[in-house]
Image (cartoon, rainbow, N blue to C red):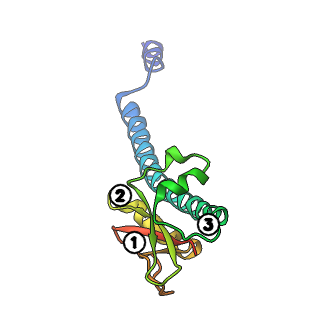
Amino acid sequence: MTARIKKRARRGFTLIELLIVMTIIGVLSGSLLLTMGSSTDKAEATRIVTDLNSLRLAAGLYYADNAGSTLSPDITRLKAYVTAPEKLSGDQYEFKAGENAGQWFVGCKIASQPQGVRDSLKKMAANNGLRNGVTSADNDVYDGGASGVYIRVR
């Protein structure tokens, strides 16, 4: 009789064991989703900073090719100097004159971006020269605002 009970107990897992394993898998997958969400925001912020730096370099090339002419706030002229211009949407990026003569900025409108992206941009602002607007003030470091983020061209 005991041999029959032992055989029966070895055939599979109990309901409690299966529930414990499913709970552990659920907790691990939930924590993984939280981690993946923040890395997606950081990746998007990094893409924005990279695009702004590409546009800044493109503005320098445009200015060098058209020596003697003034820069014009037209983002489509800069796209000719970028490797993958199709990735830069014209309605998201802009080229603006600064408040002082001879100052130019490229910017990205980020109102449609989630708060996580803006927080990541705020953390990256000091190291990458990101600004709130097109002012000449040195303390105008990007603070996580929703309107846009700019980088100085010249």
User: What is the x, y in percent for residue 70?
Assistant: 55, 71
User: What is the x, y in percent for residue 60?
Assistant: 63, 66
Looking at the picture, which amino acid does disc 2 mark?
Pro
Say if 99 sits above or below 17 in the image. Answer: below
Task: Give the spatial CA distance, label 1 vs label 3.
Answer: 30 Å
Task: Give the spatial CA distance, label 2 vs label 1.
Answer: 11 Å
Horizontally, residue 151 falls left or right of residue 65, namely left
Q: Earlier in the sequence, mark 3 or mark 2?
A: 3
Looking at the picture, which amino acid does disc 3 mark?
Tyr
Query: Dividing the image into 4 quarters, which one contains the N terminus?
Result: top left
Looking at the picture, which amino acid does disc 1 mark?
Gly
Rendering quarter of residue 50:
bottom right
Q: Nearer the viewer, mark 3 or mark 2?
A: 3
Q: Which mark is residue 114?
A: 2
Q: Nearer the viewer, residue 8 or 72?
A: 72
Rendering quarter of residue 78:
bottom right
Q: Secondary structure at mark 2?
A: loop
Q: Classify mark 1: residues with Cα within 10 Å, few (<14), some (14-19) or many (20+).
A: many
Q: Which mark is residue 63?
A: 3
Horizontally, residue 143 falls left or right of residue 61, namely left
Name the residue that disc number 1 marks: 144
Q: Nearer the viewer, residue 121 or 116?
A: 121
User: What is the x, y in percent for residue 117?
Assistant: 42, 60
